[in-house]
Image: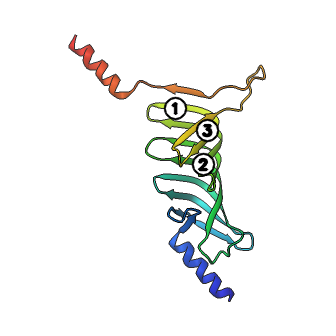
Amino acid sequence: MHQKLFTILFILLLSNNIYAKNSAVKTNIKSKIVKIVKDKNFIEFKGNVILVQEDISFLANQMLVFTDKNKKMSDKAEIQLIKAKGKVKIFNQEFIATGDSGIYDVDKDIFKIFGDVILNEGTKIAYGTEFIYDVSNKKGSLSSSVKNNDGKVSRPTVIIHEDLNNLKQGINEDSDN
């Protein structure tokens, strides 16, 4: 019986298909090392971990994937929560956010990144301590909890560069004169 369960889990991991609660959304996770802790219903991924779900990617040095405790690991594993550590990055076509650690709350469909957070959206760069991205609504927010020397919480720092198209247009207008 244990050999059969191990074989099923091994096949599950080779296919790298773990499902979010919405069974229509397939989540693929790849890494160098995979450790299954079946009595605790979690899987540890280590070394260049890459999670891809539809149009969003989540990268880290380590991810702990917690599955539904009411289901056996041999069933279709449903992700409930993912905790990530070490060079965490989340990105899609619109932005890239990096930080020290992060989580993905499947029930709420929200990614959170913590620590020294850098958010890059095109030509805009922002710095803070927490980035929250709501996948369903495609909206994100950046906040800061760092206190200044006077004890007040600082605001996130945002650096906005001129849009490249506006910059090119300005150069062309100057060369026409």
Q: Residue furthest left?
A: 176
Query: Which quadrant holds the N terminus?
Result: bottom right
Helix, strand or loop for disc 2: strand
Marks 3 and 1 sit apart, C-alpha to C-alpha, by: 10 Å
Q: Residue furthest bottom?
A: 1
Query: Which quadrant holds the C terminus?
Result: top left
Indicate which disc residue 111 carries. 2
Q: Which residue is mark 3?
A: 117
Q: Residues within 10 Å of mark 2 (few under 14, many from 20)?
A: many
* Left or right of residue 121, residue 80 in this image: right
* Left or right of residue 103, residue 97 in this image: left
Count of picture labels: 3
**Residue situated in front as seen by the camera: 3 or 66:** 66
Who's the residue at 54% across and 58% down the image? 51
Residue type highlighted by circle 2? Phe
Residue type highlighted by circle 3? Val
Q: Earlier in the sequence, mark 3 or mark 1?
A: 3
Q: Earlier in the sequence, mark 3 or mark 2?
A: 2
* Residue 116: quadrant of the picture: top right
Who's the residue at 57% across and 44% down the image? 133
Indicate which disc residue 125 carries. 1
Residue type highlighted by circle 1? Ile
Work out whether 158 lies above or below 79.
above
Residue mark closest to the camera, 1 vs 2: 2
Picture coordinates of residue 27 (x, y %)? 53, 62
* Left or right of residue 51, residue 170 in this image: left
Q: Residues within 10 Å of mark 3 (few under 14, many from 20)?
A: many
**Residue situated in front as seen by the camera: 14 or 112:** 112
Asked whether the beta carbons under mark 3 and mark 1 sit within 8 Å of each other, the answer is: no
